[in-house]
Image (cartoon, grey):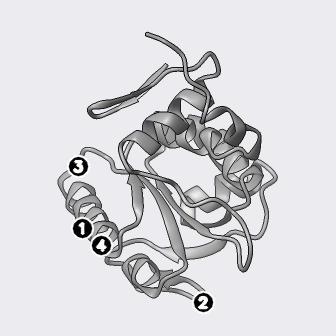
């Protein structure tokens, strides 16, 4: 069972439970479908990198393209995930083919953000700016690796059929 805020999703499969909870909170993650696949933007603190490979694989399985900041991108590539668009951290000048993180959010293709900030004051302010940008664009944003992984696994196409099943409490 997973819950999000004031809603709950009940199912034997935790992925289905999370998908129900997200739907109940009106946080319906976009699903891959016709047209260009949606883009997931990842910027993960070092302390949370333990879950990065699972997060990346689940998003790719759900049909997402990935964009990531430098360290996050390097670890995803080490995990065998390819084709990750490079993104400059907030406040850093983009280098080469990098795009600024706020510019990418505002440009339109990003449909999901997972940003886990470090507890230092600069990164916390940066995370607030990223959250504000996602809110302004109506983009789903997760700030913990556990919730990001659970939500990404809930996007698995095999989960869709289970969302409509009802169980009594």
- State the residue position of label 2: 96
**Of callouts 4 and 3, the N-terminal one:** 3
The reply, left or right, for residue 52 in relation to residue 102 is right
Could you tell me residue 54's position as x and y percent?
67, 39
**Of callouts 3 and 2, the N-terminal one:** 2
Q: Please rate how many residues cluster around mark 3, counting C-alpha atoms within 10 Å: few if below 14, some from 14 to 19, many from 20.
A: few
Q: How far separated are the C-alphas under marks 2 and 4?
A: 24 Å
Q: Residue 133 shows which numbered tag?
A: 4
Q: How far separated are the C-alphas under marks 2 and 1?
A: 26 Å
Could you tell me residue 105's position as x and y percent?
42, 77
Marks 1, 3: nearer the viewer = 1
Position above or below: 30 against 156: below
Could you tell me residue 7's position as x and y percent?
33, 31
Measuring 43% from the left and 10% from the top, which residue is drawn there? Answer: 169
Measuring 17% from the left and 54% from the top, which residue is drawn there? Answer: 121
Q: How far separated are the C-alphas under marks 4 and 3?
A: 20 Å
Q: Quick one: which residue is furthest to the top in this view?
A: 169
**Of callouts 1 and 3, the N-terminal one:** 3
- Residue contact at pointers 1 and 4, CB within 8 angstroms: yes
- State the residue position of label 1: 132
Secondary structure beneath label 4: helix
Viewer-nearest residue: 55 or 97:
55
Q: How far separated are the C-alphas under marks 1 and 3?
A: 18 Å
Residue 120 appears in the rendering: yes
The reply, left or right, for residue 54 in relation to residue 72 is right
Marks 2, 1: nearer the viewer = 1
Could you tell me residue 134's position as x and y percent?
34, 68
Secondary structure beneath label 2: loop
Measuring 29% from the left and 66% from the top, which residue is drawn there? Answer: 135
Q: Please rate how many residues cluster around mark 1, counting C-alpha atoms within 10 Å: few if below 14, some from 14 to 19, many from 20.
A: some
- State the residue position of label 3: 120
Q: Please rate how many residues cluster around mark 4, counting C-alpha atoms within 10 Å: few if below 14, some from 14 to 19, many from 20.
A: some
């Amino acid at each position: 069972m997973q819950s999000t805020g004031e809603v709950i999703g009940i199912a034997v499969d935790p992925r289905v439970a999370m998908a129900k909870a997200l739907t109940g909170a009106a946080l319906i993650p976009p699903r891959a479908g016709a047209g260009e696949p949606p883009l997931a933007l990842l910027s993960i603190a070092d302390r949370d990198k333990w879950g990065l490979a699972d997060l990346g694989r689940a998003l790719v399985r759900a049909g997402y393209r990935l964009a990531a900041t430098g360290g996050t991108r390097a670890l995803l590539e080490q995990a065998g995930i390819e084709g990750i668009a490079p993104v400059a951290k907030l406040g850093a000048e983009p280098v080469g083919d990098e795009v600024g993180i706020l510019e990418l959010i505002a440009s339109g293709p990003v449909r999901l953000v997972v940003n886990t900030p470090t507890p230092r004051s600069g990164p916390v302010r940066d995370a607030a700016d990223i959250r504000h940008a996602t809110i302004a664009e109506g983009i789903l944003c997760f700030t913990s690796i556990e919730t990001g992984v659970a939500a990404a696994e809930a996007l698995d196409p095999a989960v869709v059929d289970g969302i409509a099943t009802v169980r009594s409490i």
